[in-house]
Image: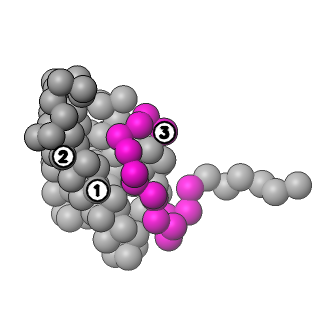
Amino acid sequence: MAVNRGPNPAHIVTVTDLSPQTLRSLIAHLEVSTDFEHLVYRESELDAIWSISGFVLKNDPEKADGETIHRLHEAAHRAHDLVACGRPREAADILRTCL
């Protein structure tokens, strides 16, 4: 029987949507990321969240809940900056507010 040891920070989170499942996976990875390589991955994943949310805001505003998506867009930006400063757990806290 395989034992689930939680997220592996060396694995890249696939970000193809803005679903709660995607956000939870990214948050879990942020919480265990310590190495420079891990932080680079997390920055890239947050970039994807920021890009997708920006695309939705610009191109499909009536389909999206604008306030929720806007809040996620801003949170992804702030979280990215925190990861760049070596503060991934604080970034996870910010992203968690969007769930």
Q: Secondary structure at mark 3?
A: helix
Q: Quadrant of the C terminus?
A: top left
Amino acid marked by disc 1: Ala
Which of 1/44 is in front? 44
Q: Which mark is residue 55?
A: 2
54 in the magenta segment? no
- Tell me how far mark 1 sits from mark 2, CA to CA: 10 Å
Which badge, 1 or 2, comes first in the chain's sequence?
1
Q: Report if the CB atoms under discs 1 and 3 are less than 8 Å apart.
A: no
Query: Residue drawn 61% across and 52% down?
Result: 6
Asked if residue 39 shows in the view, the reply is: no
Q: Is the residue 63 above or below the residue 23 in the image?
A: above
The 10 Å Cα crowd at callout 3, few under 14, some 14 to 19, many 20 or more, is few
Which of 56/72 is in front? 56
What segment carries the magenta color? 7-21
Q: Main secondary structure of the magenta part?
A: loop
Query: Residue drawn 46% across and 58% down?
Result: 13
| Circle 1 residue | 48
Give the quarter of the image for residue 43.
bottom left
Amino acid marked by disc 2: Phe
Residue placed furthest toward the right: 1
| Circle 3 residue | 21
- Tell me how far mark 1 sits from mark 3, CA to CA: 15 Å
